[in-house]
Amino acid sequence: SRARKVASAKRVIYLYMAGGMSHLDTLDVKPGAETQGPTKAISTTADGMQISEHLPRLARHGKHLAIVNSLHSRTGAHQQGNYLMHTSYEMRGTIQHPAMGAWLLKFQGKDNPTLPANVVIGGGSRHPGAGFFESSFAPVAIGNPSRGLQNVEAYLEQDDFQYRLGLSEKLGRSFQEHYQKKSVRAYASAYDDAVKLMQSPDLEAFDISRESEKTREAYGDDRFGQGCLLARRLVESGVRFVEVSLGGWDTHQANFVKVPQRCDILDRAMSALITDLELRGLLDETLIVLTSEFGRTPKVNQNVGRDHYPKAFSCAFAGGGIVGGRRWGKTDENGEKVVENPVTPPDINATIGYALGLPLDQVLYSPSKRPFTAAHKGQPIVDLFA
């Protein structure tokens, strides 16, 4: 197996930029290029590594960042690109593939037996979830991080609650025994997990109001920022995989107005997250992934926007055993095509799997007996770890 015997990452915070993040205006700036537009480059704390002027706080974390500038795919539609990035497989009408959080749980199980181990904060509607795995591997979706996990308090007295729960179990037992189906098992296990969670003292991990005003302000007063803060609380309590989504990157119009706004939200939250994890001694065992479904066209369109562009785009890693302060791969002088160390979405998932010590070569079978692996044919970028 390509996976290491001792993995440095125990958990993942996956920051997904929904809509297609412009590589030229974020992580792959090309000073002097005609395609660059008004976005300028600034230096980072890593020697010779520049990023967009719209990410000044992240620039101060350059020593932690490993930037991949050579991502490419053939998938230029949102839903299909999102699916490929999350699962390593192309979308099919006949099967749903598991996302990386589900693969992690399948291979390594939970850290905290009562909390959900896989969580998606914001933008979970297009998430492939557990795919063909049991529903227990699917992420719990949270819409508003400030409201945490909803409907977790019983409105009945404990004795009454236990009586009704026992009655429900008794009434459903013969049905469950007669119909041994995945959907029936899923329904029963959802009840069990919900009751365990309701009674868990760790439930307060979902309550970001327990954080100081100063900490909440550091992450930014918006859903993505507060979602990153919630992600930090969750991984601290043993949640294995947390995705936080930030939309609004589909900049067909007014790219140079919208991208700085999105970048400000991302910059504040991701920088606060790196700082917070480092101060708490959690950065080395928490892999942060920043990615998107594709990039944007180097050519600026007639609406001063950039269109869908899967031919070249960028992502970044921090923590989790990654050696920061470096780039991997390269695009040409205009950011139009990959010219060095090409990387695919399955390679990114293989890198996540490698960091976690997942058995990337181990074949698991779908209910229709078809073989699948965690990152399809992806190869991990092992050089990022040494």
Image: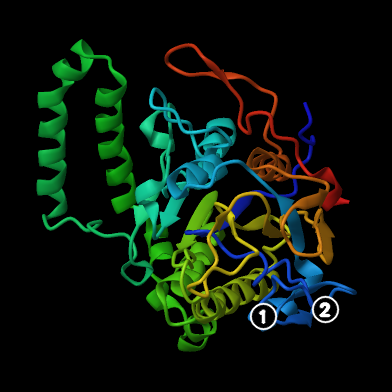
Decide if residue 239 is in sight here.
no
Res. 142 image quadrant = bottom left
Residue pushed farthest bottom?
214
Q: Name which residue type carries label 2.
A: Thr
Q: Which residue is mark 2?
A: 45
Res. 375 image quadrant = top right
Residue 267 location (% of width, % of height): 60, 76
Numbered tag placed on residue 257 in the rendering = none
Residue at position x 44%, y 36% in the image: 137
Q: Nearer the viewer, residue 141 or 209?
A: 141
Residue at position x 54%, y 84% in the image: 218
Total marks shown come to 2
Crowding at label 1, few (<14), some or many (≥20) Cα neighbours within 10 Å? some
Residue at position x 77%, y 82% in the image: 42
Instruction: State which tag comes first along the sequence, 1 or 2.
Output: 1
Decide if residue 296 is in sight here.
yes
Residue 178 location (% of width, % of height): 19, 11
Give left or right: position of 367 versus 170. right
Q: Quadrant of the N terminus?
A: top right
Give left or right: position of 164 versus 260. left
* Mark 1 and mark 2: Cα distance apart in space: 19 Å
Residue 199 location (% of width, % of height): 31, 52
Q: Is residue 161 above or below residue 34?
A: above
Q: Secondary structure at mark 2?
A: loop
Q: Is residue 340 above or below residue 304?
A: above
Crowding at label 2, few (<14), some or many (≥20) Cα neighbours within 10 Å? some
Residue 66 location (% of width, % of height): 77, 60
Q: Which residue is mark 1?
A: 39
